[in-house]
Amino acid sequence: MNPLATSLGRLSLESPVAVASGTFGTEYFDLFPQAVLGLYISKTITMEPREGNPPTRLYETEAGLLNAIGLQNPGLQGFIRDELPRLRDILEIPLMVSFSGASQDEFSQILETLEREPGISGYEVNVSCPNVEREGIAFGADPDVVFSLTRRLAALTNKELTVKLSPNVTDIAAIAQAAETGGATSLSLINTLYGMAIDWKTGRSRISRPVCGYSGTGIKPVALALTYKTAQTVRIPILALGGIFSWQDALEFFYAGASSIAVGTAFFSDPLVAVKLRDGLVDFLNSKGLSLKDIIGKVSL
Amino acid sequence: MISCKTLPLAENRQLNASYRVLVVRDAEMAANCRPGMFCELKAAVPEQERKLFKPVSVYGVSGDEVSFLIKVIGPGTASLAALQPGDPLQVLGLLGNGFPIVENKMVLLVSGGVGYPPLAYLREFLESDNDIHFLHGGACAEDVFPCDEVFTDDGCAGKRGFVTDGVDKLLAEKNIDVVFSCGPLPMLKKLAQLVAPLPHYCSLEAYMACGVGVCHGCAVPVGEDYSRVCKEGPVFEAAQVRWGEI
């Protein structure tokens, strides 16, 4: 009996450890075996290729990382031609493809096109990127838009449909509920918080796009609170992420109601972090005679 | 093949108040290393656990020893500098493409500040088969390292002025075939203008996170769109760099 077995909507996962879109690539499988992970989430793609934002795109703060990558990606056709065949060859774990669009029609077209491709187990609908103008967060901040978008997409697929939510909204629970009602089979949260840094010596923004995305250790309490709040509101499972570095961090998210978690920025501080996290969870659960399912959502107040 | 290892520091040698040489022993890395490649380094101490690695060019290889020349700039590099022999150092590498290797050429090496190490390593690689002129510039005497001609901003060591002043003179005197460079972006930009249309390979610096090509954080305007310093670089043909956007 695998104490880490979990599920995300329609997917059964051998490990509750996934990767945050845009922070991971198969390059890391030179460093550790992919079975450590339960789910591979690819970098967000858009209909057309995007070259991303000009440098500087990164700045490390006191407790986390600012980024303004800007959804750099080869576009839908480039992904299908160059990356998907490679991912199909390499991956032994389920592949979830993350995508974003500039209109509901574009989201639908991307999903319809991907539906024709073998080797995809599910989709992460990215309505929460803070670093682009038209795609992303413009969609994720309005419950009515999230509802109608999710409803359209849910009608197009029988695969896992995860909506990735932004923390940069007034009421995440209303948006989570809209996605669930629309037909999302799971939610992932949180995307990056808004962040900014200025060089006090020169008065210049540290990053080319001044208000950008903030991830890493400093956002963990925010992510945890939003996971808890969302879990109190919806019945579909939650893939939680935001500042998770250790198995202890992961446990907090399971108690708050997440059924799986993703590691992102932590890979940049320790490429082997997922191995340590998975092993730590196994040891902890075995020492307590528990399985993951025994603790999900069991926070005591 | 990239590896991520925690290695005991073999040596930590102080050059002056700002610069130190860190040495690790790793036969595999030493065998596969080429000038221009780099590693992501981090002191394995609790306060650095959740911090990013620092990308550092390889300074030299000798037997199974791989050395890095670091400048202490902030907390990350200060914690590297504080390591004692035997202390654990996290090493993610080898990363990057490295410089092309040439033969029977008149070679010009130009470095500025902490851009010196990859060119010092390259010189070792090239000097038996090429005629080499190595120019280096720094802000002050601390930033000066062994080479053929030195320039400092205030003239406290070598000649007063920018290293690019020396390049101008050398180009008039010698038939340079190829140029290799590493240093601050303004220096590289000026140099690219001076030495064009000669073949010129420059190693670029960028703020970096993953080091392995997944995060796209270290993108620079090279070619038609952006290239990753960690993956397609750090060495680029200067003619491919869109200097106007830097």
Image (spheres, helix red, strand yellow):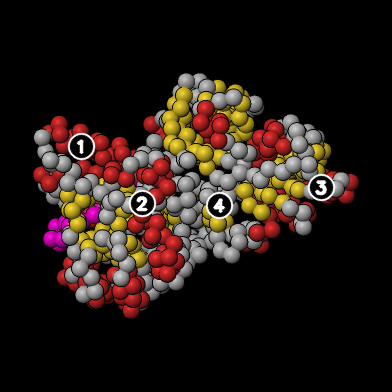
Disc 3 crowd rating (10 Å Cα; few below 14, some 14-19, many 20+) is: some
Q: Are marks 3 and 4 on the same chain?
A: yes
Q: CA distance from mark 3 to mark 4?
A: 26 Å
Q: Which residue is mark 4?
A: B232
Q: Which residue is mark 2?
A: A90
Secondary structure of residue under mark 4: loop
Judge depth for marks 3 and 2 and give the one in front: 2
Q: Is there CB contact under 8 Å for labels 2 and 4?
A: no
Amino acid at the residue labelled 4: Glu
| Whole-percent x, y for residue B108 in the image | 77, 44
Q: Given the image, what chain letter belongs to the residue carrying mark 2?
A: A
Residue A128 coordinates in the image, percent (x, y): 33, 64
Residue A242 visible somewhere in the drawing: no
Q: Secondary structure at mark 1?
A: helix
Upstream in the sequence, badge 3 or badge 4?
3
| Residue under numbered circle 3 | B176
SS state under label 2: helix
Could you tell me which chain the residue with mark 3 belongs to? B
Of residue A230 and residue B170, the one placed in the foreground of this image is B170
Please name whichever residue, A129 or A48, is drawn nearer the observer in this view of the structure: A48
Query: Left or right: A37 with respect to B183?
Result: left
Q: Residue at x 41, y 72 (%)?
A: A47
Whether pointer 3 and pointer 1 mark residues with C-beta atoms closer than 8 Å, the reply is: no
